[in-house]
Amino acid sequence: MPSPEFVKIASWHNPADAEHAKAVLNWNGIDAFIEGADLKTSLSYIGSALGDVKLIVRSEDSKRAQRLLDELSREARDPINGPWFCGECEEVIEPGFDMCWSCGQPREEVEAPFPEVADLATESDGSDPRDPANASLPESASVDETNPYAPPTVQAMFEKIEAEDEPTSQEEAEDLITQSANAAVLGILIPLFGTLYSLFLLFAALRLSWNFSSRTRYLIFQSLAVNFVVSSIWLALLWLFSLM
Ligand SMILES: [Zn+2]
């Protein structure tokens, strides 16, 4: 059997688009491979100066693959068969889904227009709105809180980013446990203080969450073990001193 020949049939700037196309081809029984995605993802901050992400198929599949990709790009431009936006959870839903995969609600109830970035050029104080020095955030009062389909303003988008940056109580607890494990080791150098501080952090963490990864559970165990060993050593030393 001759070894199959491979041909490049398409390329994308965005690795996610290539992954999507690959998934569609795989679904249709065509083996497709992506070339350049890892490099592109890890170096994406360099921008599109790097080569594109290529999709490769066996040459015998190339005609059928090309047809499927043509269909795919036609669908993407089609407003009915293209992707749609869920106003409820602000997710872009792949074409073909009549239900939001995130909130599970039907399309006709939650579909909303795609959000647009607030247009700063509408500010009409006579200054050039493209000059960053003249750019101003819209008044938060102008955000219509009652309309869930209102496009997010710059202000609202900043609020969203801040909200996402806030650590969850789970992450906070895991941080505290890491600190507790470190403080336990500190107890070797600063006997009573390090140990008590470590136990305090552990207690604070367990008040926040009880649901931890195995790594964090290991850290809890490590913190307790180190605290136990360190306290034992210091108590034994104190006892020896009291005998002298
Ligand atoms: Zn949704």
Image (cartoon, rainbow, N blue to C red):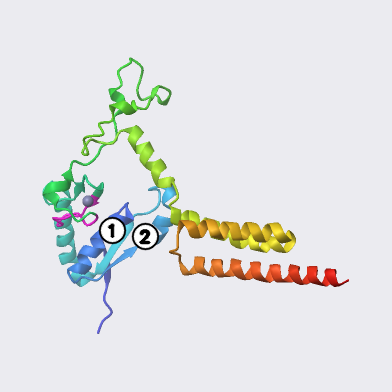
Q: Specify whether 162 is left or right of 67.
A: right
Would residue 101 be counted in the magenta stretch?
A: yes
Residue 37, disc = 2
Would residue 126 be counted in the magenta stretch?
A: no
Residue 239 spot, x, y in % from top left = 79, 71
Q: Which residue is label 1 attached to? A: 18
Is residue 38 visible to the viewer in this orientation of the structure?
yes
Q: Distance of mark 2 from mark 1, alpha carbons?
A: 8 Å
The answer to whether residue 138 is above or below residue 175 is above
Instruction: Name the residue rendered at 34%, 38% in the picture.
Output: 157
Q: Quadrant of the N terminus?
A: bottom left
Q: Specify whether 232 is left or right of 198.
A: right
Occupied quadrant, residue 33: bottom left
From the viewer's side, name the closer residue of 156 and 183.
183
Mark 1: C-beta under 8 Å from nearest atom of ligand 1: no
Callout 1: SS: helix
Magenta span: helix, strand or loop, mainly? loop
Residue numbers of the magenta segment: 92-102
Q: Are marks 2 and 1 in contact (CB under 8 Å)?
A: yes
Residue 167 spot, x, y in % from top left = 45, 50
Amino acid beneath label 2? Ala
Instruction: Name the residue rendered at 74%, 71% in the picture.
Output: 233
Instruction: Name the residue rendered at 21%, 70% in the picture.
Output: 30
From the viewer's side, name the closer residue of 100 and 193.
193
Amino acid beneath label 1? Ala
User: Hey, which residue is sitting farthest front in the picture?
Assistant: 243
Residue 35 spot, x, y in % from top left = 34, 63
Neighbour class for label 1 at 10 Å: few (<14), some, many (≥20)? many
The answer to whether residue 226 is above or below residue 166 is below
